[in-house]
Amino acid sequence: MKIGELAKAANCSTETIRFYEKEGLLPAPDRNDSNYRSYREGHLDRLRFIRNCRTLDMAHDEIRTLLAFMDGPDADCAPVNELLDEHIGHVDVRLAELNRLRAQLIGLRQQCATSKPIDECGIIHGLVAMETEEKLPSASHLG
């Protein structure tokens, strides 16, 4: 199948397919006599796998690892379980970060319960008075 057909079947863009090829996640396709890419069913399966992993916020390195396991089907799946457990841990860290952020926002919102002139707005005053913290990178690879 051509790249446009693959993109339609996988519900993605042709640019996404080319990107995954450049990243080494999707193997290069064969070329036909006109030098057009010619994809097989295996490309579609692999592309769906990659896209499903991305939907679960897996990083490219995690996907590469899973693809390597997929390419060695006789190996034990315990490392796959470990990778997923680690990814769940990343999600837990991100959830904790988001909960802290939510609590801060709720605290700010509570400083202005009713409509007031801007110069009396508790949210605006709270944002001015709040200590400016260094923006730390997320403890999770999810960002």
Image: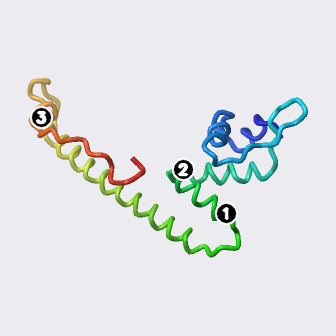
| 45 sits left or right of 62 in the view | right
| CA separation in Å, label 1 and label 2 | 15 Å
Residue type at mark 2: give it: His
> Is the residue marked by circle 2 packed among few (<14), some (14-19), or many (20+) residues within 10 Å?
some
Q: Sequence-wise, which precedes: disc 3 or disc 2?
A: 2
Q: Residue at x 82, y 32 (%)?
A: 36
Q: Are marks 3 and 1 in contact (CB under 8 Å)?
A: no
Residue position marked by numbered label 3 in the rendering: 122
Task: Give the structural element (helix, strand or loop) at label 2.
Answer: helix
Residue type at mark 1: give it: Met
Please give the label number shown on residue 70.
1
> Is the residue marked by circle 3 packed among few (<14), some (14-19), or many (20+) residues within 10 Å?
some
Residue position marked by numbered label 2 in the rendering: 60
Relative to residue 81, is residue 1 depicted above or below? above
| CA separation in Å, label 3 and label 2 | 43 Å
Q: Could you say where residue 11 lies in the image, as x and y percent from the top left? A: 68, 41
| 34 sits left or right of 91 in the view | right
Q: Sequence-wise, which precedes: disc 1 or disc 2?
A: 2
Q: Quadrant of residue 76?
A: bottom right
Task: Give the structural element (helix, strand or loop) at label 1.
Answer: helix
Q: Sequence-wise, which precedes: disc 3 or disc 1?
A: 1
Q: Residue at x 55, y 71 (%)?
A: 79
Q: Residue at x 34, y 58 (%)?
A: 93
Q: Could you say where residue 114 lies in the image, as x and y percent from the top left? A: 16, 35
Query: Which image quadrant: the N terminus?
Result: top right
| 55 sits left or right of 131 in the view | right
Q: Could you say where residue 81 lies in the image, as x and y percent from the top left? A: 53, 70
